[in-house]
Structure formats: C-alpha cells, structure tokens
Image (cartoon, helix red, strand yellow):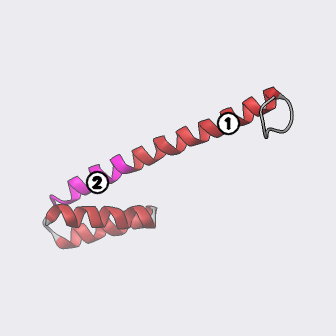
C-alpha cells in the first residue's frame, strides 16, 4: 500500500504514471516554445523595414498574445 493513496496499488501506480506523463509533456512543450521564440526572434532581428517587423509581431500576437509579446521583446533585445 502507498501511504496517502486511495484505492488499489495499481490505481495509485496508474495515477502517478499519468501525472508523470503530464509533467513530461509540459516540459517538452515549454522547450519547444523556447526554441520557437529563439528561432523567430533571431530571424526577425535581421529585418530592417519597420513596417514588416511590426506586421510580424502582430502576426505572432494573433496566434498567441503572450508568445507574441515575448518574441517582440527578444527581437528588440537582439537588435540592440
């Protein structure tokens, strides 16, 4: 028996396994998000036409507001 667990040992094992898988998925998703932001901000930092850059920021914000904001900040930081 597992201390604090309800139900059978098999049910406790399965619940723990499901929780672990959710955690691993979250970590993988976070890493993918970080790579996306790094790649996009690196590409955008090379753009020189301000109107094109602003449209790109708007594009990413339309997909995800938070990610778009981070991409803009990272791009502007890279540009100096």
Q: Is residue 3 above or below residue 26?
A: above
Q: Which residue is mark 2?
A: 40
Q: Is residue 1 magenta?
A: no
CA–CA distance in space, label 2 to label 1:
33 Å
Q: Earlier in the sequence, mark 2 or mark 1?
A: 1
Q: What percent of the width, then of the height, locates residue 39?
A: 27, 49
Dot 1, crowdedness within 10 Å: few (<14), some or many (≥20)? few
Instruction: Identify the residue shown where x is 86% and y is 35%.
Output: 7
Q: Is residue 41 left or right of residue 19?
A: left
Tell me: 22 left or right of 63. right
Check the image and report above or below for 44 versus 31: below
Return the residue nearer the eye: 19 or 40.
Answer: 19
Magenta region, mostly helix, strand or loop?
A: helix
Return the mark for residue 42. Answer: none
- Magenta residues span 34-47
- The residue carrying mark 1 is 18
């Amino acid at each position: 028996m597992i201390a604090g667990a309800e139900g059978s040992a098999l049910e406790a094992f399965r619940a723990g396994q499901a929780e672990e898988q959710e955690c691993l998925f979250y970590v993988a998703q976070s890493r993918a998000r970080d790579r996306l932001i790094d790649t996009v901000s690196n590409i955008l930092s090379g753009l020189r036409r301000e109107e094109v850059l602003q449209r790109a920021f708007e594009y990413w914000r339309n997909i995800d507001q938070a990610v778009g904001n981070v991409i803009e900040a990272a791009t502007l930081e890279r540009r100096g």
